[in-house]
Structures are given as C-alpha cells and as structure tokens.
Image (cartoon, rainbow, N blue to C red):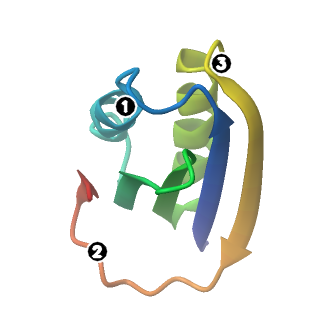
Amino acid sequence: MEVCRRVFYEGYVQGVGFRYRAMQIAGEYSVTGFVRNLPDGRVELLAEGEESEVGEFLERVKESMSQHIRKAVENREPCSHEYNDFGIR
C-alpha cells in the first residue's frame, strides 16, 4: 500500500547536513518526495512510496540525525504522485 508522510523536524537541524543526508539515505529506498529547510528553523521532509519503504527510510533518517533532532511531528497525507524522485528543495 502506498503512503505519504510529511515530517517536520525541530532542533539543531539546519546547517548540519540534514537535507543532504536525507537525500543520500533516500537513494537506498524506493521513495519519492523532498526535504527542505523552513524559515522558522525546522526541516520539512515529505516521502511517498510503499509503506515499508517509507517507514524504513524515515527510521534511518531519524537514527542518522538523532543527535540533532529534538522533536519530529509526522503527518499522514494522501499520495499526490507528483514526484519522480527524492530531492532537496
């Protein structure tokens, strides 16, 4: 089953390679979407794909950047299918 997850990460998440690390990890999974910095200091990540792939991808991002993440808020959304790959915005 395809799912879409939008996660907002808070903490010391900008200026530490968060977006580049997320993109690198995404290359190991069948996910599409994006990661971007927000003006308020958070990082937004949107991932679409099979439930297991998205879940494992988000867990790897969390593990990899755990020292920088203070809080993560995850929302489920309908899949838009508008992304062909995973990139940095």
> Closer to us: mark 3 or mark 2?
3
Q: Which x, y percent locates residue 84?
A: 21, 70
Residue at 31 percent of width and 84 percent of height = 82
N-terminal of the pair, mark 1 or mark 3, is 1
Q: Quadrant of the N terminus?
A: bottom right
SS under mark 3: loop
Asked if 83 appears above or below 81 in the picture, the reply is above
User: Which residue is the extreme one toward the front?
Assistant: 40
Dot 1 and dot 3 residues touching (CB under 8 Å):
no
Q: Relative to 72, is 46 on the left or the right? A: left
N-terminal of the pair, mark 2 or mark 1, is 1
The part of the image, by quadrant, that contains residue 59 is top right
The part of the image, by quadrant, that contains residue 21 is top left
Label 1, residues with CA under 10 Å away: few <14, some 14-19, many ≥20? some
Q: Which x, y percent locates residue 33?
A: 37, 63
Q: Tag on residue 83?
A: 2
Asked if 23 appears above or below 31 in the picture, the reply is above
Q: Relative to 83, is 67 on the left or the right? A: right
Dot 2 and dot 1 residues touching (CB under 8 Å):
no
What's the CA distance linking mark 2 and mark 1? 17 Å
Q: Tag on residue 25?
A: 1
Q: Quadrant of the C terminus?
A: bottom left
- Residue ID for mark 3: 66
Amino acid at pointer 1: Ile
* Foreground residue among 15 and 32: 15
Dot 3 and dot 2 residues touching (CB under 8 Å):
no
Residue at 57 percent of width and 54 percent of height = 40
* Foreground residue among 20 and 59: 20
SS under mark 1: helix
What's the CA distance linking mark 3 and mark 2? 27 Å
Amino acid at pointer 2: Tyr
Residue at 55 percent of width and 27 percent of height = 60
